Amino acid sequence: EAQVVESGGGLVQVGGSLTLSCAASGFTLDNYAIAWFRQAPGKEREGISCIDSDGNTYYRDSVKGRFTISSDNAKNTVYLQMNSLKPEDTAVYYCATSEYRNVCPTTHTSRYWGQGTQVTVSA
């Protein structure tokens, strides 16, 4: 069964760091663009970062300079390194794959979604 599973969330203080992982099984992650999304309570899910099959990376303005997306093809895993965390980064974080190599997924155009991992940033 093809799936992606997120991990690495937790409780961290303001200014701290976390690294999230998105591990794929049943398919090769490198064949698709992968994105990280997040959803805070009472808010819509939003895309925050994407990496395509050529290694091009994209970031939402609110996380530029603080978050870094990367991939390890040998481990079939994509990571999201999050530094300088703020209370507004508190959310459930999801990864999702695109149907394509070089087109980032959106909330409405994705192939596989994970179950999410909670990130809580305390003031």
Image: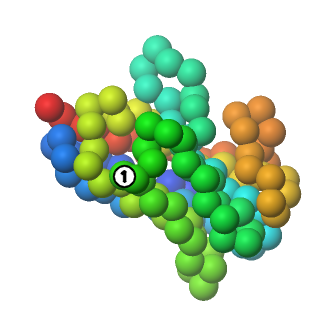
Q: Which residue is found at the position 80% from the left and 60% from the top?
A: 102
Residue 29 image offset from top left, x and y in percent = 70, 68
Up the image or down, 54 lies above or below 114; here it is below
User: Furthest-top residue in view?
Assistant: 42
Task: Give the colouring mode of the picture.
Answer: rainbow
Q: Where the N terminus falls, by quadrant?
A: bottom right
Q: Which residue is found at the position 57% from the left and 28% from the top?
A: 45
Residue at which label 1 appears: 66
Which quarter of the picture shows residue 3? Answer: bottom right
Residue 94 image offset from top left, x and y in percent = 54, 44
User: Furthest-bottom residue in view?
Assistant: 74
Say which amino acid is labelled 1: Arg
Q: Which residue is found at the position 50% from the left and 54% from the top?
A: 6
Q: Is residue 9 visible?
A: yes
- Are there few (<14), some (14-19), or many (20+) residues within 10 Å of tag 1? some
Q: Is residue 112 left or right of residue 63?
A: right
Q: How many callouts does the rendering have? A: 1
User: Furthest-right residue in view?
Assistant: 100
Residue 42 image offset from top left, x and y in percent = 46, 14
Q: Is residue 1 left or right of residue 57?
A: right
111 or 36: nearer the viewer = 36
Q: Is residue 20 visible?
A: no
15 or 72: nearer the viewer = 15
Up the image or down, 51 lies above or below 95; here it is below
Q: Is residue 107 left or right of residue 82?
A: right
Q: Which residue is found at the position 54% from the left and 41% from the top?
A: 60
Q: Is residue 16 left or right of residue 51?
A: left
